[in-house]
Image (cartoon, helix red, strand yellow):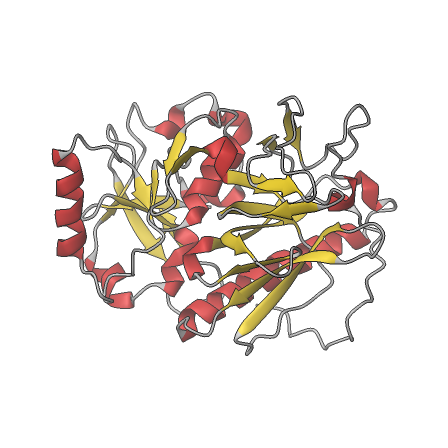
Amino acid sequence: MTIAKDSSTDEIIHGNDLRGMDDFYIKTTSFECPYEPCKIKATPCSFTMKHVNQSYFRYGDKHKDGCGIHDPRYKNNHTSNDERKHNSPPAPVISLLKIDVKPRGGVKNARNIKNENHKDEKKGNEHPVSSSSIKPVVDYYINNSNHNEQLSIPPYGTRSYKDTFQLIFYKNNIRYYKPAIYYGVAQSNIRLHEDSDKHCITFLARDKKTQKPFTLEIDVSDWNKSQKDVFWKEYEKQRKEADRYYKGLKDKRNAKKYLTVFFFGMPDENDKFLFKTNHFKLVYVAFLGKFESSYNDSNYYIENDLSVSSLNEQPISLSDIDHKNHEYNIETSLDFSSPLPEPEPEPEPEPEP
């Protein structure tokens, strides 16, 4: 998890996205630390398809006073090995997620985007920090306990981080109905096929009676070859790491890390267990430890009872699997004793050098 700012557009770029972006854009763009008092140079690395390792930003100089990397609040939360190794600062709070922005080299170019930013500045610079990827947004969410910051996602309006992020869990007659940044623990023993135009990710949250799981359908048919390659490799890397970890546990209920998938997407109108997305920058897969997740009931309703649940607000985390004092129970979200059939065995690829 490394980040930098495109100095020409002021957009926050996530290191994982570099390999899916245009090489000419990367080579001709000046990247810098996103914190205003700092702005030291950031170097994009490992962004061509020939590289084995994930793409990232590296900072060679020491960050200046006032940079978020020196904030003591991040000492315990901000512990990614990549961030420490490459001297990357933590993600700042993103106030604008531009889900409809196309990569430079597509319809919009840097000059057009810069002009649009100037228009915003004339209106009072309502969105000082923006990104077209959910990855830095997710990084901020999982590393901070303050989820009351506002996030604008045109054309879907502005909501707090708390109301934008929605943990996928099962509850009798639950129906998710809003576009949001959904996330949940995924089943790690199901491989994705590299050449497929659609990927299906299975979550551990499911109907207790029918055992039907929530699933995410990712349409990658419009992605370029590089985007397809980097997503598949990163998913398989995280999945294998999670699978090895779970197999090494005597009791999977004692797991401290989870294969977690974040995505901005829509619930399907006909199948309440199905979510859909099709944007390369709007899916993020990570094998994560515990993080604080605000309780949120604003993106679902209970069928046959259209009133929104009046449960008390309280912080939750992926490890809070049993709330016995009220109806909110996400035990099935972490049901590692999955009765789903194991997939047909496939030969593992040769280990990377």
**In front of the other: 124 or 40:** 124
Tell me the quadrant of the picture where the C terminus can be found. bottom right
Q: Position of residue 298 (x, y in %)?
A: 55, 35
Q: Residue at x 65, y 21 (%)?
A: 312
169, 104: nearer the viewer: 169
Q: In this figure, what is the number of numbered marks? A: 0
Residue 23 at what x, y percent from top left? 29, 66
Vertical side of 30 occupied by 314: above or below: above
Residue occupying image coordinates x 83% and y 66%: 341
Regarding residue 60, the answer to whether it shows in the image is no
Identify the residue shown where x is 77% and y is 28%: 323
Residue 250 on image: x %, y %? 88, 46
Q: Is residue 116 left or right of residue 22?
A: left
Residue 97 quadrant: top left
Measured from the top left, where is residue 210 in percent x and y?
83, 57
| Left or right: residue 215 compared with residue 126 | right
- The answer to whether 95 appears left or right of 310 in the picture is left
Query: Which residue, as the protein is rendered here, is positioned at the far right?
Result: 250
Q: State left or right for residue 59 relative to residue 300.
A: left
| Image quarter of residue 157 | top left
Task: Determine if residue 120 is in view.
Answer: yes
